[in-house]
Image (spheres, rainbow, N blue to C red):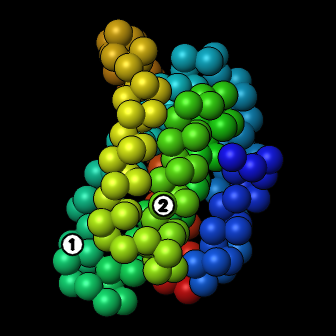
């Protein structure tokens, strides 16, 4: 890996993918809220946002992949930017393993967009990245009840972060 920060890497991914520079979706208020949480509460927040972003992508974007062409490219750009933002969120939460997973996902998707990967190479790289994801999430399975309770407790902050990530990713992909 390199020594770039997550935000620097995300900005570089945008540049090489033909996207405008990435803005930080984490306002001072969101950052302040995250910093006020305990470590496991921050992980709960990341998991909650992860779920919200994934559901939104599935419902509002993923069907564009089947259309091919510019619609598929738009969907892939959203995926790359959302992954970069999720890496940043995981980094803010101190969750290095999940940050690394999202960094690699953003890189893989960006390589597909740029034509450095064909679909088979992209699928193989994503499959390889499934193990680090499983390793990052495995310890949290035992804390499922704790995280579920936090999803309710932290709903406002989760929704705020998820909306920022989703909105900014769609704006970036559309420009």
Would you say 58 lies left or right of 129 here? Answer: left
Q: In the figure, 89 relative to 61: above or below?
A: above
Q: Nearer the viewer, mark 1 or mark 2?
A: 2
The residue sitting at 58% across, 40% down in the picture is: 100
Classify 10 Å Cα crowding around label 1: few (below 14), some (14-19), many (20 and above).
some
Q: How many marks?
A: 2
Q: In the figure, 38 relative to 35: above or below?
A: above
Give the structural element (helix, strand or loop) at label 1.
helix
**For the residues marked 1 and 2, what is the alpha-carbon distance in whole angstroms?**
20 Å
Q: State the image coordinates of residue 117 (x, y, percent, origin top left).
A: 43, 71
Question: Nearest the camera: 35 or 11?
Answer: 11
Disc assigned to residue 63: 1
Question: Nearest the camera: 48 or 8?
Answer: 8
Give the structural element (helix, strand or loop) at label 2.
helix
Classify 10 Å Cα crowding around label 2: few (below 14), some (14-19), many (20 and above).
many
Q: State the image coordinates of residue 106 (x, y, percent, origin top left).
A: 52, 58
Question: Nearest the camera: 43 or 152?
Answer: 43
Would you say 17 lies left or right of 116 here? Answer: right
Q: In the figure, 159 relative to 148: above or below?
A: below
Q: Say if residue 171 shows up in the picture.
A: no
- Please report contact status of discs 1 and 2: CB closer than 8 Å, yes or no: no
Q: State the image coordinates of residue 56 (x, y, percent, origin top left).
A: 32, 57
Q: State the image coordinates of residue 156 (x, y, percent, origin top left).
A: 49, 38
Among all residues in the image, which is located at the extreme bottom? Answer: 69
Disc assigned to residue 158: none
The tag earlier along the polypeptide, 1 or 2, is 1
Q: Is the C terminus in the top left, top right, bottom left or bottom right quadrant?
A: bottom right
Among all residues in the image, which is located at the extreme right? Answer: 3
The residue sitting at 38% across, 11% down in the picture is: 143
The residue to which callout 2 is attached is 108
Q: Say if residue 132 shows up in the picture.
A: yes
């Amino acid at each position: 890996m390199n020594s770039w920060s997550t935000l620097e890497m995300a900005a570089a991914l945008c540049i090489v993918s033909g996207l405008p520079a990435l803005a930080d979706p984490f306002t001072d208020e969101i950052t302040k809220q995250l910093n006020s949480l305990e470590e496991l509460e921050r992980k709960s927040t990341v998991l909650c946002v992860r779920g919200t972003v994934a559901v939104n992508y599935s419902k509002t974007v993923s069907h564009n992949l089947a259309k091919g062409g510019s619609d598929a490219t738009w969907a892939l750009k959203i995926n790359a930017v959302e992954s970069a933002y999720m890496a940043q969120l995981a980094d803010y939460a101190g969750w290095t393993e999940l940050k690394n997973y999202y960094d690699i996902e953003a890189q893989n998707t960006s390589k597909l967009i740029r034509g450095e990967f064909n679909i088979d190479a992209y699928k193989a790289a994503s499959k390889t990245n499934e193990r680090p994801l499983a390793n990052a999430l495995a310890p949290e399975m035992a804390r499922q009840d704790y995280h579920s309770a936090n999803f309710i407790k932290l709903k406002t902050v989760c929704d705020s972060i998820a909306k920022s990530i989703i909105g900014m990713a769609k704006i970036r992909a559309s420009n």
